[in-house]
Image (spheres, rainbow, N blue to C red):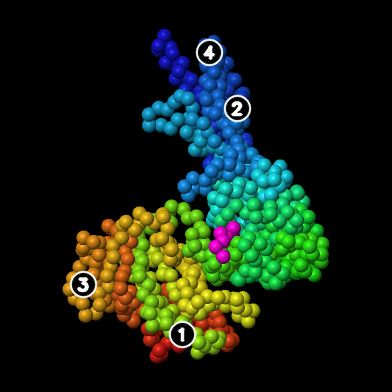
């Protein structure tokens, strides 16, 4: 009997080998939405199979096919049963609102369900040691369950479950700004507000937002997935998509708080807007000094200042204004959305009679509106000047407007002020980090304070550049040292400036500034962060990097390099051998080391420490020979920004990391002969 069964089993294996139940090489990369699996490969024809059966014995013609059929159904049930169950029940359901814990973004619900590829573990194991189980093979080889972006088109059923008494907060982004969208969602969730949704301008970001459980809708903008730039054709068209989005929400009957994706919510905004029940439209502004009292709106003079539609609140009653806004932009292909809306808002702008809430008559008397207080809805400049702090107020939002270095500058400013939610990986580095004490001579501070010439002449900016250049020499050495010590990430200093930038000269954008000179400035004031992100994206960190709670473990692993004075010899390393830190984790290093001596003395320290910190006169730590100077000047020439502006045309003056090195090639592609002098252009 055993022999007979053995022969039957052998025949069964031969017959089964002629049939492919499924293609195990099914590509996991398949993008087609079709659910149909690939057809069996190399199957014999039905006539050939029947002819073979007729030649067999009774047991072979009846028993063997029966066994084969049973086995086929068993295998199919085993392989596809979990999948069918998953497709019926494994849905991407909106997650219930959950309190935020720690620093992780709590999950948030999209308003619609989408089928997702999820496989539940079987209750038993069919694994043979050393081989993958059937279910494991199925998971790894099956294509993704198809989904349709059209399921996320904006509709009332999508928004209604998210809205808070008809109120919804909205932003929008393309794939290039995914990190901004994540940051926006993280911070508004952190305020306790769950009534928000993010517009996905392209399918790439839509998929990412769905994976992250961030409530989203599909805008299908057909615009670039890269940066929009500034006043480009794509930028202008993006403004039209924004206006159409606002109209859609108002058409659906929602009171809509729309903000650009580079804004950050610091408090739940809806309690503020509910205080102004008669307001049809409230818009933020570029005011620096507020005219509001407590948490009131800006007065008439404040509303006549430059409005900024990066944050605005509209009720459905403002639909007629939005429709005219869209029509005006349609008639003017180059029309800027902000300028067009400002024109409509200010049409016959007057104080609304018999009102105590500060609302104004806007849009030719058809609506009530106002300008949001800049002390509570801050711009990049008003927050930097401390407008909120002076009044003892807690801002509702910060909008990264009026910031240099484009998207890179906005991201950096948000990081510097603690408004950016970084992933844990940013606090690690394959080499380590380099930091230093920024030495600012008191005499240069006093010179700026006592300088009375506030004109926009070359003479008027000399104290500012003397102060800046002293710090740039130190920054140059730090950047060179970080590169030489294996490519560590340099922590940028908080630089002191003696003159306020005016990014739109002649317009007086910062004419209201009350800064006391000198002042510590964000990095985008002095550095071309966009260029740095292009060339060295992981080789620098913002000045506040080591002050953040996530950096605490780094600070526990720090060695301090004390740069000795020139006349000091005792215990100061020459750089001819690896330096051995003392018990207090310090190393004393002679000044003016060449690059070989620097590497010899310090490069091994990153094997034991995560931070190498320099104390003393950083600019005296190393010196470069002419070849090294030429190399690093070429490498770092594009990393510095420009001061803006003096009265000459052009009026900008570039900062120069090698200002004190005669013979180097400057931004004019000229050899600098003699002492550095400020020169506008190129």
Q: Please tell me whether residue 139 is drawn above or below residue 458 in the rendered image.
A: above
**Which region of the structure is painted magenta?**
391-397
Q: Which of marks 2 and 3 is nearer the N terminus?
A: 2
Q: Nearer the viewer, mark 3 or mark 1?
A: 1
CB atoms of marks 2 and 3 within 8 Å: no
- Tell me if I can see residue 253 in this picture: yes
- Helix, strand or loop at disc 3? loop
For mark 4, what is the residue?
Answer: 63
- Helix, strand or loop at disc 2? loop
Q: Residue at x 63, y 49 (%)?
A: 196
The residue nearer to you, when weighing 47 against 565, is 565
Q: Distance between the residues labelled 1 and 2?
A: 98 Å
Give the crowd class for mark 4: few <14, some 14-19, many >=20 residues within 10 Å: few
Whole-percent x and y of residue 389? 53, 65
Decide if residue 573 is on the left or right side of residue 346: left
Q: Earlier in the sequence, mark 1 or mark 2?
A: 2
Q: Distance between the residues labelled 3 and 1?
A: 39 Å
For mark 2, what is the residue?
Answer: 45
Q: How far apart are marks 4 and 3 (CA)?
A: 92 Å
| Residue 572: mark in rendering | 3
Give the crowd class for mark 1: few <14, some 14-19, many >=20 residues within 10 Å: few
For mark 1, what is the residue?
Answer: 450
Q: Distance between the residues labelled 2 and 4?
A: 21 Å
- Tell me if I can see residue 596 in this picture: no
Whole-percent x and y of residue 144? 57, 40
Q: Which residue is drawn at 43% across and 12% down?
A: 4
Q: Which of marks 2 and 4 is nearer the N terminus?
A: 2
């Amino acid at each position: 009997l055993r022999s007979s069964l053995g022969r039957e089993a052998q025949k069964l294996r031969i017959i089964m080998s002629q049939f492919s139940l499924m293609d195990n090489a099914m590509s996991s990369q398949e993008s087609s939405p079709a659910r149909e699996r690939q057809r069996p490969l190399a199957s014999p024809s039905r006539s050939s199979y029947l002819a073979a059966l007729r030649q067999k014995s009774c047991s072979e013609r009846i028993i063997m096919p029966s066994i084969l059929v049973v086995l086929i159904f068993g295998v199919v049930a085993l392989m596809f049963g979990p999948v069918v169950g998953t497709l019926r029940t494994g849905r991407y359901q909106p997650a219930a609102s959950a309190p935020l814990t720690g620093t992780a973004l709590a999950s948030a619900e999209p308003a619609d369900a989408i089928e997702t590829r999820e496989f539940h573990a079987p209750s038993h194991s069919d694994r043979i040691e050393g081989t993958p189980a059937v279910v494991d093979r199925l998971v790894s080889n099956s294509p993704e369950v198809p989904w349709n972006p059209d399921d996320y088109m904006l509709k009332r059923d999508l928004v209604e479950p998210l809205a808070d008494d008809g109120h919804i907060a909205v932003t929008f982004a393309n794939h290039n700004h995914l990190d901004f969208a994540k940051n926006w969602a993280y911070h508004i969730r952190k305020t306790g507000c769950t009534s928000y949704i993010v517009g996905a301008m392209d399918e790439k970001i839509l998929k990412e937002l769905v994976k992250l459980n961030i409530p989203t809708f599909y805008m299908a903008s057909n615009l670039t997935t890269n940066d929009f730039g500034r006043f480009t054709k794509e930028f202008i068209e993006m403004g039209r998509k924004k206006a159409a989005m606002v109209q859609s929400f108002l058409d659906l009957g929602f009171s809509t708080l729309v903000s650009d994706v580079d804004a950050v919510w610091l408090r739940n905004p809806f309690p503020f807007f509910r205080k102004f029940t008669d307001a049809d439209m409230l818009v933020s502004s570029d005011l620096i000094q507020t005219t509001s009292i407590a948490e009131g709106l800006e007065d008439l003079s404040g509303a006549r200042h430059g409005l900024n539609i990066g944050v605005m609140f509209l009720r459905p009653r403002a639909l007629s204004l939005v429709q005219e806004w869209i029509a005006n932009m349609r008639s003017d292909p180059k029309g800027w959305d902000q300028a067009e809306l400002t024109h409509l808002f200010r049409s016959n702008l007057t104080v609304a009679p018999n009102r105590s809430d500060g609302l104004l008559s806007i849009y030719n008397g058809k609506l009530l509106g106002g300008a949001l207080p800049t002390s509570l809805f801050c711009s990049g400049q008003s927050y930097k000047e401390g407008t909120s702090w002076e009044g003892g107020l807690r801002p509702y939002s910060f909008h990264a407007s009026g910031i240099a270095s484009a998207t890179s500058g906005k991201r950096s400013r948000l990081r510097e002020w603690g408004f950016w939610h970084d992933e844990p990986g940013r606090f690690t580095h394959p080499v380590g980090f380099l930091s230093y004490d920024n030495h600012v001579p008191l005499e240069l501070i006093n010179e700026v304070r006592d300088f009375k010439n506030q004109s926009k002449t070359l003479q008027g900016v000399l104290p500012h550049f003397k102060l800046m250049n002293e710090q740039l020499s130190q920054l140059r050495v730090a950047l060179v040292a970080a590169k030489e010590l294996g490519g560590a990430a340099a922590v940028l200093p908080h630089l002191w400036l003696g003159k306020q930038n005016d990014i739109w000269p002649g317009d007086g954008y910062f004419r209201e500034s009350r800064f006391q000179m000198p002042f510590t400035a964000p990095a985008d004031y002095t550095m071309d962060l966009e260029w740095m992100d292009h060339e060295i994206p992981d080789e620098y960190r913002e000045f506040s990097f080591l002050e953040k709670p996530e950096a605490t473990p780094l600070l526990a692993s720090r060695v301090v390099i004390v740069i000795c004075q020139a006349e000091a010899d005792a215990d100061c390393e020459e750089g001819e051998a690896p330096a051995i830190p003392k018990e207090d984790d310090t190393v004393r290093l002679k000044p003016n080391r060449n690059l070989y001596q620097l590497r010899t003395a310090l490069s091994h320290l990153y094997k034991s420490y995560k931070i190498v910190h320099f104390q003393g006169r950083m600019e005296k730590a190393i010196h470069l020979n002419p070849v090294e100077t030429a190399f690093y000047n070429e490498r770092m020439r594009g990393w510095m920004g420009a001061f803006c502006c003096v009265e000459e045309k052009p009026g900008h003056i570039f900062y120069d990391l090698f200002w004190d090195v005669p013979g180097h090639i400057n931004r004019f592609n000229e050899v600098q002969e003699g002492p550095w002098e400020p020169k506008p252009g190129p």
